[in-house]
Amino acid sequence: MNTAHHLRLGVNIDHVATIRNARGGDHPDPLRAATIAAAAGADGITAHLREDRRHIGDRDIERLGQTIALPLNLEMAATEEMLVVALRHRPHAACIVPERREERTTEGGIDAAGQADRLRPIVAALTAAGIRVSLFIEAERRQLDAARTLGAPVVELHTGTYCEAWHSGREAFVREHARLVEAARYGKSLGLEIHAGHGLSYDTVKPIAAIGEVSELNIGHFLVGEAIFVGLAESVRTMRRLMDIARAEALLA
């Protein structure tokens, strides 16, 4: 494998914990899910510790950090509580995301430009601790410029609107894809590392995987849902295969 062109897959295991918490107890275990995902081709594990602990819990973060060999990406809100958690556990990376208690899932990117004063000390503290900081943002130049100014080396482009456009007709889908392509290229020109994620499925992943400036995709809900039918290892392997095919085809084009 040419690592220079390898597109990394981060598997988000939040919703394994969602199923566990629906019943209480220890099953299914997010740590076991992380181990299976690693064996099936994941390059990293992502987990979002929410304020209300609706899925991943503090003990999950502790166990993941102590046990898995893959890099751990902690998704976190820009709060003092979550900063304390991140500094305690020292994950490989921390992705700062917007968070509202009443939302079902993350609804969009964080406003890095409008919330720069609040984000700046958090980015600085995480960076000083050796944690690689990512900002989950919309595919907009204003947000990319803000990320660079804040000193975050990585951005994750929100692909939720793009995935929703898959069901809205070709025109909307092409428009949203073009917006992500432009943002990835612009962000890369600023020296940012470009990731992408939210809502990606077998149907929508290949056009994003073909964007050469994108170095990592973070995917969770679809993989856990598909695992009900085919098993987690198979859902991860299929996603890995589609990503690799798309990247190889793009390099040959």
Image: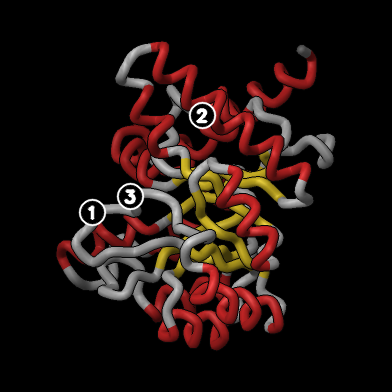
Q: Looking at the rendering, which quadrant does residue 153 occupy?
A: bottom right
Q: Nearer the viewer, mark 2 or mark 1?
A: 1
Q: Is residue 157 left or right of residue 204?
A: right
Expressed as whole percent of the image width and height from the top left, the position of residue 98 reads 39, 62
Above or below 54: residue 3: above
Q: Residues within 10 Å of mark 1 (few under 14, many from 20)?
A: few
- Amino acid on which the number 2 mark rests in the picture: Val
Nearer to me, 251 or 35: 251
Task: Describe the element under mark 2 as helix, strand or loop.
Answer: helix
Q: Looking at the rendering, which quadrant does residue 1 occupy?
A: top right
- Amino acid on which the number 3 mark rests in the picture: Glu
Above or below 35: residue 167: above
Expressed as whole percent of the image width and height from the top left, the position of residue 199 reads 39, 39
- Tell me how the rendering is colored: secondary structure
Q: Is residue 39 left or right of residue 24?
A: right
**Residue under the image location 72 percent in, 52 percent down:** 192
Q: Is residue 96 left or right of residue 19?
A: right
Expressed as whole percent of the image width and height from the top left, the position of residue 22 reads 17, 62
Residue corresponding to mark 3: 107
**Residue under the image location 33 percent in, 50 percent down:** 107
Residue corresponding to mark 2: 205
**Which corner quadrant holds the C terminus?**
top right
Q: CA distance from mark 3 to mark 2?
A: 19 Å
- Amino acid on which the number 1 mark rests in the picture: Arg
Task: Describe the element under mark 1 as helix, strand or loop.
Answer: loop
Q: Nearer the viewer, mark 3 or mark 2?
A: 3
**Residue under the image location 37 percent in, 33 percent down:** 230
Above or below 54: residue 238: above
Task: Describe the element under mark 3 as helix, strand or loop.
Answer: loop
Residue corresponding to mark 1: 104
Q: CA distance from mark 2 to mark 1?
A: 22 Å
Nearer to me, 113 or 242: 113
